[in-house]
Image: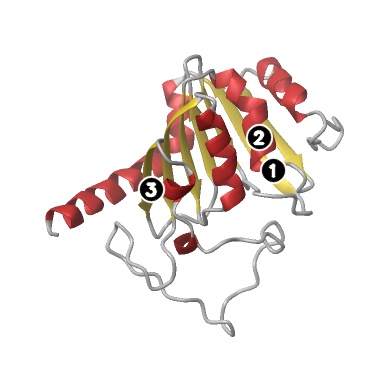
Amino acid sequence: MNEQIGIMEPCCIERTLPMLLRKNSGWMPWQSNGDITFAHILKALACLAASPLEITLVTPNISLPILRTLKWYHQRGWLNKLTILTAPAAGETSETGETPDAPDAQEAPAPPVESAAVPQQPTTSIDPANEIPGLDLEVLTHTDVTDDLLVITGAKATVIVQGRLLPEVTPARYNYVTYCGNDPERIAQFTATTNAQIKVARKRLNKTKQNT
């Protein structure tokens, strides 16, 4: 890691990020140049949480590289449960009962610098249950999901990452905040919005199932 500008590097993140989290009382802001992927982040931080792991993944779009990384952890017996909260595709009704509009190519604003070059797979083209068979898996949708969040709950600690969870190397400047610990108040600061969205999505999904 370059200490002067706070940029994490893929060659060092597995050693450096856990060390800095311990040094900074479990809280650490950092940056990357787009060469830190979801796989790098999970490899660096899963050991701090300690298996068995329960992961909550919040992402506007589900990608195959991320699912395949999670499948690898499940196959080794480290990942026991996965909850995915994602945004519904345009024209698809979410568990909240809302239908997002398809973006107008002429009116849609330009994407921010951090996301402009990120290739994304359409959410509806991927079925996580098919990609990770046998895993205790829940997939929910909510129209307010716009940013990425990773919550790893393990035997020793909860690890949370705010920031872009890249499926593959995508050059740009990305900002992250990572927390590791067991303080309920600190955890709630990171997860309150996500937990509320999950609660609404589950309620709507259960109501839909009862009506079918």
Report the residue that reaches farthest toward the left. 211
Q: Nearer the viewer, mark 2 or mark 3?
A: 3
Left or right: residue 65 versus residue 93 is right
Q: Residue at x 69, y 21 (%)?
A: 18
Sequence-first tag of 3 and 1:
1
For the residues labelled 2 and 1, say whether their Cβ atoms are less than 8 Å apart. yes
Q: Which residue is mark 3?
A: 139
Nearer the observer, 44 or 164: 44
Label 3 is placed on what type of residue?
Answer: Val
Q: Quarter of the image holding residue 32?
A: top right
Q: Residue at x 19, y 57 (%)?
A: 208
Q: Which residue is mark 2?
A: 41
Which disc number belongs to residue 37? Answer: 1
Q: Residue at x 52, y 53 (%)?
A: 62
Q: Position of residue 178 (x, y in %)?
A: 61, 32
Left or right: residue 193 versus residue 162 is left
Q: Position of residue 136 (x, y in %)?
A: 37, 35
Label 1 is placed on what type of residue?
Answer: Thr
Dot 1, how many residues are within 10 Å of its Cα: few (below 14), some (14-19), or many (20+)?
A: some
SS for dot 3: strand
Sequence-first tag of 2 and 3:
2
SS for dot 1: loop
